Amino acid sequence: MPTYQYECKDCGSSWEEFHKVAEREAPLKVPCRLCFGEIKLIPQIPSMISMRDGWQRHTSDGWKDRLKEIKKNNPGSTIDV
């Protein structure tokens, strides 16, 4: 599932969530968890990683750090970092 980044238009808090493409706008229908402001979807450039030789060999350190952060914030995650 793709990861989407969201941001509150009022307080500026931002976060990422996994959603099916068809459900990417679902978080826009609820208010910000911090200030109850309006949420917007932040456009991002899609990326693709070849898994043929293993993702760890082809992944930058910055991306690995982000994966570690996602795994830490989602205890049930099956991400292998």
Image (tube, grey):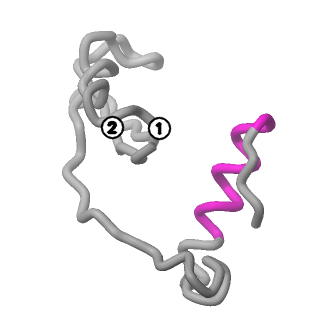
- At x 40% / y 36%, what residue is drawn? 13
15 lies above or below 23: below
Magenta span covers which residues?
65-76
Q: Tell me the kind of residue under disc 2.
A: Tyr
User: Would residue 63 be counted in the magenta stretch?
Assistant: no
**Local secondary structure at mark 2:** strand
Marks 2 and 1, Cα distance to the nearest angstrom? 11 Å
Using the image, tell me which numbered label, if any, was put on residue 6: 2
Mark 1 residue element: strand
33 vs 12, left or right, is right
Q: Which mark is residue 18?
A: 1
Residue placed most toward the observer, 72 or 53? 53
Main SS of the magenta part reads: helix
Query: Residue at position x 36%, y 43% from top?
Result: 4
- Position of the C terminus, as image quadrant, is bottom right
* Circle nearer the viewer, 2 or 1: 1
